[in-house]
Image: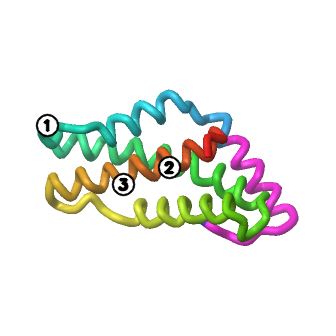
């Protein structure tokens, strides 16, 4: 997710981030995050978690370039830059993980994707 860009590549990244920002529906993403992080008396069916994983991955892939562009415009090394970079690194790790074979591991993975998505959405919305 982190690349060093210059000149026209940087402007292309900014344009892509702007296009992504136009696609962000914070209410829909927020409801998905709520579903992922909801307290449950019992674990949901595996298929429900698979569906939720696909949706969360799409939200993260939409939000990550926006947060990446924000970080690129900041002074490298300041707190806000570091927080965004950390969230982007966490997103990359979460996206590279799988749900595993069991229901418990799938639920843990979905919760991590939900936390990552919430963090990126907060940055995109200017809440952090």
Q: Relative to 92, is 101 on the left or the right?
A: left
Q: Residue at x 39, y 47 (%)?
A: 114
Q: Is residue 18 above or below residue 74?
A: above
Q: Relative to 60, is 20 on the left or the right?
A: right
Q: Which mark is residue 41?
A: 1
Which of pointers 2 and 3 indicates the residue nearer the eye? 3
- Whole-angstrom CA distance, mark 1 to mark 3, is 19 Å
The part of the chain drawn in magenta is 2-19
Other residues around mark 3 within 10 Å, as few (<14) / some (14–19) / many (≥20): some
Q: x, y percentage for residue 42?
A: 12, 39
Q: x, y percentage for residue 94?
A: 40, 61
Q: Residue at x 48, y 63 (%)?
A: 90
Q: Residue furthest front?
A: 79
Image quarter of the N terminus = bottom right
Decide: marks 2, 3 in contact (CB < 8 A)? no
Q: Which mark is residue 112?
A: 3
- The residue that label 2 is drawn on is 60
Q: x, y percentage for residue 10?
A: 80, 61
Count every numbered label the image shows and give the total.
3
Decide: marks 1, 3 in contact (CB < 8 A)? no
Q: Which callout, 1 or 3, points at the residue further toward the start of the chain? A: 1
**Residue 5 among magenta residues:** yes
Q: Residue at x 48, y 44 (%)?
A: 118
- Whole-angstrom CA distance, mark 2 to mark 3, is 12 Å
Q: Assign a secondary structure to mark 3.
A: helix
Q: Is residue 49 above or below residue 31?
A: below
**Residue 17 among magenta residues:** yes
């Amino acid at each position: 997710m982190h690349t060093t860009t210059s000149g026209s590549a940087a402007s292309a990244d900014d344009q892509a981030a702007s296009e992504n920002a136009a696609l962000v529906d914070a209410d829909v993403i927020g409801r998905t995050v709520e579903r992922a992080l909801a307290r449950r008396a019992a674990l949901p069916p595996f298929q429900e978690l698979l569906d939720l994983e696909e949706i969360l991955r799409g939200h993260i892939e939409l939000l990550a370039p926006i947060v990446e562009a924000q970080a690129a415009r900041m002074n490298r090394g300041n707190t806000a830059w570091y927080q965004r970079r950390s969230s982007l690194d966490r997103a990359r790790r979460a996206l590279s993980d799988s749900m595993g074979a069991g229901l418990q591991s799938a639920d843990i993975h979905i919760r991590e994707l939900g936390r990552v998505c919430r963090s990126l959405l907060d940055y995109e919305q200017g809440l952090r």
